[in-house]
Image (cartoon, rainbow, N blue to C red):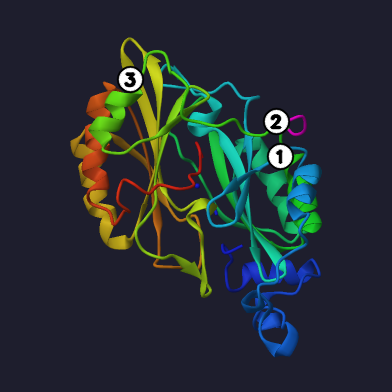
Amino acid sequence: MPHRTFRRSALTGLALLAAAGAPTFAQQGTAPAGPGGAPAQQQGLAPNADWHRTVASVLGRPGAEQPGGVYRVSLPRTDLKVALDGVEIRPGFALGSWLAFHPHGQELMVMGDLVLLESEVAPVMRRLAAGGLEVTALHNHLLRAQPATMYMHVAGHGDAARLATALRAALQESATPLGGGAAPAAAGAERIDGLDTAAVARALGREGRAAGGVYNVSVPRAERVTEHGAEVPAAMGLPTVINFQAAGNGKAATTGDFVLTAGEVAPVQRALIENGIEVTALHNHMLGEEPRLFFMHFWAVDDAEKLARGLRAALERTNSRRAEAAPGGRGGG
């Protein structure tokens, strides 16, 4: 993906949360009032200071602090062996489930993207609904992958224990590895055999970070993105994500997604196609964001520098931040 909650429909999400016994924003009107009657979030109130520990303990896997006060838990599908066009997909390349938590008033917001086999979709969705969480999108990212994978975007708000418990119950309906996870290692110093990451960075015009055999480049949008009037931090899943991994025979595979406004969809699509990069999906991840955003996924196997030049041509048709600022990506979703 945020990503990365702010992904909430006006009807479905509120109904699910109300059914679970959680007060909705429509019922609250605004954030809970603090001393003097001012909204709590304006008074600087936040969830319990131990909420990070609660989330990590319940999910069984530690997260990492991200820019904008976001706490992100990575849940890579290391159990899956997925191949596409002769390339074995690394977990961090396109099989990375994640959940991002962010304080909002005295509650937490969560957004995430769950990588699932087709047989896991229905049971996971049922558990999410029972736990008062909303599914805001369900779609493919890749084509021709074996086995096929689906990507389920989730959203919710509430206290840390309730959210984490509901999410763990849903994840347990899949074979997603839980428990025993170590804190994410620092990215950037790893050497990737068969992939000249320095050459990719020069051709793309963006520096990335290497980890788990994957070179990840995250490109936030320049404008402020909000949902229901609240700003959505980039680390909740809003940057364009470009991933590379070695594909053998001197070639690289690339995948990821461009985050686009409506007017950018056609120009970016043309740029990708003209550069031999396949568009594999176009869809929403969120439901009430401003400006309206679309997510265009892509795939190609070719010379790494050639691919990077083509992706740069597409990036130049977007309202992205300058290269020197690139916080918080989706990391392979």
- Which residues lie in the magenta part? 178-182
- Looking at the rendered structure, the kind of residue marked 3 is Asp
Q: Between residue 21 and residue 318, name the one nearer to us.
A: 318
Crowd rating for badge 2 (residues with CA inside 10 Å; few <14, some 14–19, many 20+): few
Look at 48% across and 68% down and name the residue there. 226
Label 1, on which residue?
A: 62
Label 3, on which residue?
A: 196
Secondary structure, mark 2, is loop
Residue 82 x/y as whole percent: 53, 23
Q: Kindly give the residue lying farthest to the top in the view shown.
A: 249
Q: Can residue 276 be seen in this snapshot?
A: no
- Looking at the rendered structure, the kind of residue marked 1 is Pro
Judged by its main secondary structure, the magenta piece is: loop
Above or below for 110 versus 291: above
* In contact (CB < 8 Å): disc 2 and disc 1: yes
Residue 191 x/y as whole percent: 44, 18
Label 2, on which residue?
A: 182
Residue 206 x/y as whole percent: 31, 39
How far is the residue under mark 3 from the one under mark 1? 31 Å
Disc on res. 198: none
How far is the residue under mark 2 from the one under mark 1? 7 Å
